[in-house]
Image: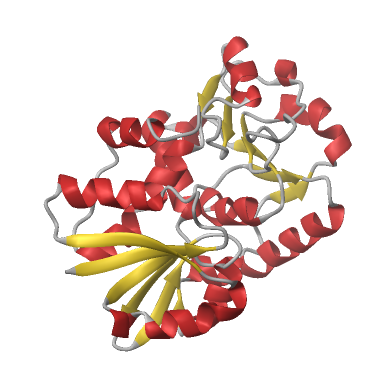
């Protein structure tokens, strides 16, 4: 029986077990997917011992993604650019790591708004943390005309852009000051919130969407609540939206395929299964 799990701290809230268990049952695969609490300082030893315990790999959630990256013996170029991994597997005694968060976001964007990369090529990304880093490279691979970042902490934003320039020196990236973001919206047609603003228990993101062009898409990587105040405001303006749940579902596909030998599909039945277990 093949086994995988998710690690992090805390990890009780992780939806990955719901997701992978659904696929295991759907495809009749004899496998298990669990969760274990692991602190960052113990990640390297934990990963080294996983194969002997019968595990094919694991997902990694906060705050363990950076520690997991440094514990890997091989990483993909995406993970190397981010210095963070969320998907681990083993090959010939080596620990491999990838970061599939951005792939998941773009796959969801493709599914809900096909052709977006031809019509919505001026992107504003709000935030400069792990979410923003995970999305940056997959978005740049779609060759936008502009990818701008806005964040409350300018120091963190400066480091993000410096790191991006190392791996993509000619990328069309720049900064929009946080206090100027409302006024700049007329220049963008895809706005993505990667901050925790709007998450359940957090203050909402304050953003005046009236300047956005009519064909714009507004996206949020938050999925609790499923419709954040930002998405509700966008819908009331008649704009297209993208919720954060699809990113969670699509980012899980590469790991499941690595561990259990079958590429799963993201279906409406899967989405409904996860939605039914989200906090009301």
| Residue depicted at 32% across the width and 34% down the height | 273
Q: Can residue 26 be seen?
A: yes
Q: Is residue 68 above or below residue 207?
A: below
Residue 114 seen by the camera: no
Check the image and report above or below for 140 versus 230. below
Residue 223: x and y in percent read 52, 36
In this view of the protein, which residue sits in the foreground, 82 or 188? 82
Q: Residue at x 14, y 49 (%)?
A: 27
In the figure, 56 relative to 157: above or below? below
Q: Is residue 17 left or right of residue 103?
A: left
Question: Which of the two residues, 264 or 181, is positioned nearer the viewer here?
Answer: 264
The outermost residue toward the bottom is 93
How many numbered markers are drawn?
0
- Find residue 30 and report its image quarter: bottom left
Residue drawn at x 64%, y 35% is 199
Q: How is the image coloured?
A: secondary structure
Q: Quadrant of the N terminus?
A: bottom left
Q: Position of residue 266 (x, y in %)?
A: 29, 41
Return the x and y of residue 2 as percentages of the image width and height.
21, 68
Residue most extreme to the left = 28
Q: Is residue 180 above or below residue 239?
A: below
Name the residue located 85 percent from the left edge and 53 percent from the top edge. 154
Residue 176 picture location, percent across and down: 80, 41
Question: Splitting the image into 4 quarters, where does residue 4 fall?
Answer: bottom left
- Residue 61 falls left or right of residue 175: left
């Amino acid at each position: 029986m093949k086994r995988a799990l998710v690690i992090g701290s805390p990890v009780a809230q992780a939806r990955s077990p719901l997701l992978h268990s659904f696929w295991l049952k759907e495809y009749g695969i004899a496998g298990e997917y669990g969760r274990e609490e692991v602190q960052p300082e113990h990640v390297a030893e934990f990963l080294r011992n996983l194969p002997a315990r019968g595990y094919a790999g694991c997902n990694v959630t906060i705050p363990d993604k950076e520690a997991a990256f440094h514990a890997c013996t091989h990483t993909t170029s995406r993970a190397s650019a981010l210095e963070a991994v969320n998907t681990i597997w083993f090959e010939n005694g080596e620990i491999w790591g990838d970061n599939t968060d951005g792939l998941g976001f773009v796959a969801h964007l493709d599914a809900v708004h096909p052709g977006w990369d031809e019509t919505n090529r001026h992107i504003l990304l709000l935030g400069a943390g792990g979410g923003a880093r995970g999305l940056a490279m997959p978005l740049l691979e779609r060759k936008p005309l502009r990818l701008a970042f806005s964040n409350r902490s300018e120091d963190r934003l400066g480091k993000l852009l410096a790191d991006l320039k190392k791996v993509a020196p000619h990328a069309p990236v720049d900064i929009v000051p946080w206090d100027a973001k409302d006024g700049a919206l007329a220049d963008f047609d895809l706005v993505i919130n990667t901050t925790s603003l709007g998450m359940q228990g957090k203050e909402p993101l304050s953003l005046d969407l009236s300047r956005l062009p009519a064909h714009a898409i507004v996206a949020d990587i938050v999925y609790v609540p499923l419709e954040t105040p930002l998405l509700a405001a966008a819908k009331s303006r008649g704009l297209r939206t993208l919720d954060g749940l699809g990113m969670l579902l699509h980012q899980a596909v590469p790991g499941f395929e690595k561990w259990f030998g079958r590429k799963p599909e993201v279906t409406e039945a899967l989405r409904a299964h996860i939605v039914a277990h989200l906090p009301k």
